[in-house]
Image (spheres, rainbow, N blue to C red):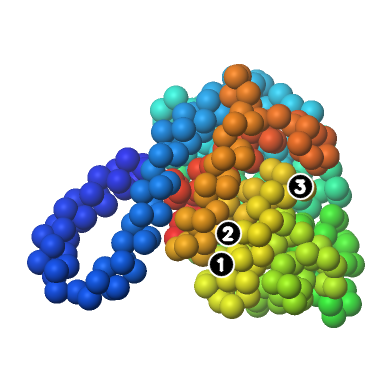
Amino acid sequence: MLSRYAKRAAFSLGLAAACAALALTAAMRPLHAQDAEEAPAAQEDALKKYEAQVDQAVERGLQYLAERQTESGAFQSTWTDNTGVVSLCVMAFLARGHTPGDGPYGEVINKGVDYVLDHSAKNGMLIGRNSQSGGMYSHSISSLMLSEVSGMVNEERQRRIDEALPKALKIILSAQQVHKNAAHQGGWRYSSASRDSDISCTGWPLMALRSARNSGAHVPREAIEDAVGFILRCRNQDGGFGYVPGGSSGVARTGVGLLSLELCGHHDSAEARSAAEWILKRPKPSWYYYGLYYCSQGMYQIGGDYWERYAPLLYEDLLPRQAKDGSWPDNISSGSQRAGKAYSTAMAVLALSVPYCQLPIYQR
C-alpha cells in the first residue's frame, strides 16, 4: 500500500508531465473557462495550509494511543476492555499508513489485532468484557477492522482472521434477517436479536459488509441493498437523516447516511448531495466525535466543492481541541465522555486522516 508521500510523488510526476500541455492550450481557452478551472485549484491551495498541522496532530494522537496500550493489547480508557474501542485505535494507525509488524507502530497494531481475535467467542461475537449497547456496535466495528487489516498480517494472524471473520460476518447477516416491520427491515440495532433498527448502529455493520465484499468475501449484494434501503427510509425532506424512519434530522445521522450512500453505489446522487448541503449548514454535531468521523468520511467521498468547503470547518474546530499530551478531550459530548480518551482520540485521528486514503474501504 502506498504511503501518503509516495502518492504525492506519483501525483507530482503526473502533474509535471501535464503542465506543458496545459500551458500550450491555456491561452486558447475562453476566460470564463479558465476561471472555472482555477476555482477548485484555489480551494485546494487553501487546504494546503492545514497539511503540516494535520500531520503533526495525527502523529501526536497516535503517540498518545501507543503510550497507553496495555500488555493485553487494549488501550487504557474508560472502556478499556472494549473490542470496539480497540478496533478504532487500530484503524487510526492503519489510516496513517502504518502496517502490522512494521515501523514504529507495527507491534501496537499487532497487539490490538490479537486482542480482538482473543475475544472472538465460539459463536463468532467479537466483544470484550466492557461491551456496550448490546454488543452490535463493538462487534461490527471489530468486524470492519479485521476485514481492513486482512492481508496485511503475518501467516498465523491471517489464519486466525480467516477463522474469526466469516463467523463475525454471519452474525451481522443473520441479525439483518431478524423479522422487523417494513420500515426497519434491512438495518441493525443494539442486539443481534433486535427487532428494530436505527441509522447510528446500522452504519457500522454496513461498512463491515461493504469492506468484506470489497475484499472478495461472500456477502450477498442484497444485504448491501437492503441496508441502503433502510438508510434511505431514514431520509427526511430537508435532506438530513433521522435516527429512525420519521425521526428528526441530526448531523451525525446525516453523516452516516451520506457515507453509506457514497460507499454503496449512490455516489454523488441527489440524496447524497442534499445530505452534504445539510451538513455544511450545521457542521458541529452534538455527538461530536461520532459525527465528525462520519461527516468527514462522507464529505471526502463525495468530494469536490463539498469537501473543500467542509474541511476548513473540520480543521478549525477539531485541531485546537487537542491537548498537550496528544489526546482529544472526552467531555465534549455524553457518548465520548463515557467511552474515554482512547475513543475520542482515535475518532479524531480517523476524521483528520481522511485525505491520506490509507484504509481500503475509504479510498476513492
* Residue 186 x, y percent position in the rendering: 76, 72
At x 61%, y 28%, the residue is 322
- Res 191 label: none
Quadrant of res 120: top right
Q: Which residue position holds label 3?
A: 287
Question: Which residue type carries mark 3?
Answer: Trp
Instruction: Please say if the residues under marks 1 and 2 sit with CB atoms less than 8 Å apart.
Output: yes
* Residue 318 x, y percent position in the rendering: 61, 38
Pick the quarter of the image with the C terminus.
Answer: bottom left
Q: Is residue 285 left or right of residue 66?
A: right
Sequence-first tag of 3 and 1: 1
Quick one: SS at disc 2?
Answer: helix
160 is higher (above) or lower (below) than 76: below
At x 59%, y 31%, the residue is 320
Q: Nearer the viewer, residue 317 or 172?
A: 317
At x 66%, y 59%, the residue is 281
Q: Which residue position holds label 1?
A: 262
At x 72%, y 44%, the residue is 288
How much space separates mark 1 and mark 2, taking CA atoms? 7 Å
* Residue 257 x, y percent position in the rendering: 67, 65
Q: Residues within 10 Å of mark 3 (few under 14, many from 20)?
A: some
Quick one: SS at disc 3?
Answer: loop
221 is higher (above) or lower (below) than 305: below
Q: Which residue position holds label 2?
A: 298
Q: Residues within 10 Å of mark 1 (few under 14, many from 20)?
A: many
Question: Which residue type carries mark 1?
Answer: Glu
